[in-house]
Amino acid sequence: MTSLITSFRMTSYRMTSFRPGILFLHGALAVLLASATPAGAADLAVGSPAPVFSALDDTGATWKSSDHVGKGILVVYFYPADMTGGCTKQACGFRDDMKKLREKGVTVVGVSGDSVRNHQLFKKAHTLDFTLLADTEGKVAEAFGVPVTLGEKVVSAEIDGKTEQLVRNVTTKRWSFVIDTDGTIALKNTEVDAAKDSQAVLALLASRIAPTAANVTYGPLERQVLDFWQAKSDSPTPVVICIHGGGWNGGDKGSYAKGVKGLLDAGISVVAINYRLMRQANEQKVMPPVKAPLEDAARAVQFVRSKAAEWNIDPDRIGATGGSAGGCSSLWLAFHDDMADPSSSDPVARQSTRLTCAAVNGAQVSLDPRELREWMPNYTYGAHAFGLPDLETVEKERGRIASWMAEYSPINHVSKDDPPIGLYYGGVVGAKKGEVHKDPTHSPMLGLLLMERLGKEGVEGQFHSSTTPNETYPNAHAFLIEKLKK
């Protein structure tokens, strides 16, 4: 497409201040950078829950991530400035590939420190058909851990025969993220090739392996469906059941298609499930609402076990994994007593719900706010599990719902006969008990709380966080492969 810009030049560059440094890691090398996001900024990794954010879009309206996450794949790309060479190539790449991206359910948003007006000029100049967000204070970049510099910069560009001055006070590094349908980070690119950024996203989507069997029903209710990928093997294989995150409010099993290859290559089959969300639970008057997603997960384990012969699965080697709420569901399955009903007329219900192991990312470990707020005073998550508006109401209703909190909090079911557990968290480096945490819902404090309980019961627990990396089992897949392939 022919550019509408006839000339471009930078007319001024003035740095006024730097943000404090943060430690960035590249392989084994750690370099302390000034001019980066503040210490304690998000340490997002692939598999981590994406931050919740909002900003003004190029129309001046407030754009909220909560309106988009869980409804498709979301690309959030950060770039330095409107109307500059590399940023123009990057934006036009997304524009030119937009038809392919939208066919795959992708929404694209670009983020820079430019103003709404600057974005309007940029979109007009290059006929950009996607949203640009005005992160004029760098708050969205901070939420993603993207380095920024502060200081006035001006780009002068001729657009439609008129010279325009595009002023900004925040300049963002060029980083790109893909947020999957379950609300977790599917791609984090800190070394972006501007002209090929859209192609990198398409390559990620193309790498997803189609399931051996898709949308298999494991129960009669809405969203009780799963996808199955069969590992090649002459003998029965272990299987990992993947439970998507999304606060039990959103997400989809399709998010796991990107991550099955490593498990399949290790000879482990994979199942990814959907389950009833809070909306369906409330419509069906399930009480407490959290009972629906958790018992659906248990039903899925039973169903998979019932398909052992047909799917060439070893019923004695079943693991589970998930992020955030999906991780909480996985832990609940791992610790809960067997829910098999030997006398049931339903052959699936007669199957065991027990697991061989579980490895989770950013998982909640309890739904009892009292113990959680001892660790993190600003903890706010979980009231919706009981159909209540907030944790203050949960406390007021404690007497009525105490049995629910006990039943549906994974940590309450820990006992000495439980399987090995892998706990993986990002979060603030050096987080401490009793402090206010930026993201308490996914804080490493949750994993440390559970590790204490596991230790008391003699259950194997492997913990990994930004502060204490686990070299033996650096990620959930490594843990699952080791435990299931013994």
Image (spheres, helix red, strand yellow):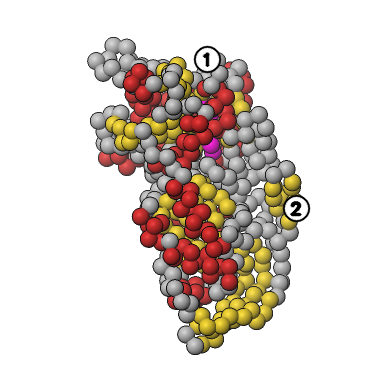
* The residue positioned farthest toward the front in the image shown: 234
**Quadrant of the snapshot with the N terminus:** bottom left
Q: Is residue 322 above or below residue 412?
A: below
Q: Quadrant of residue 299?
A: top left
Disc sitting over residue 32 in the figure? 2
Pick the residue in front: 124 or 440: 124
Total marks shown come to 2
Residue 347 appears in the figure? yes
Magenta includes 138?
A: no
Residue in front for this viewpoint, 436 or 399: 436
- Residue at x 28%, y 17% (from the top left corner): 347
Measured as percent of width and height from the top left, residue 236 is found at: 43, 19
The quarter of the picture where the C terminus appears is top right
Is residue 428 placed above or below 397 in the rendered structure?
below
Look at mark 1 in the image and give the residue it sits on: 417
Calculate the distance from the C-alpha at mark 2 to the C-alpha at mark 1.
45 Å
Please say if the residues under marks 2 and 1 sit with CB atoms less than 8 Å apart.
no
**Relative to 314, is 475 above or below?**
below
Look at label 1 and name its amino acid. Asp
The quadrant holding residue 128 is bottom left
Q: Secondary structure at mark 2?
A: strand
Q: Work out whether mark 2 precedes mark 1 in sequence or the reverse, and give the earlier one.
A: 2
Would residue 393 be seen by someone viewing this image from the given angle?
no
Q: Residue at x 62, y 67 (%)?
A: 171
Residue type at mark 2: give it: Leu
Query: What is the span of residues highlighted in magenta in the rendered image?
Result: 358-362
Which residue is drawn at the image coordinates 26% and 33% (left, top)?
Answer: 221
Task: Give the mark toward the camera: 2 or 1.
Answer: 2
Circle 1 SS class = loop
How busy is the neighbourhood of tag 1: few (under 14 within 10 Å), some, or many (20 plus)? Answer: few
Q: Is residue 25 left or right of residue 51?
A: right
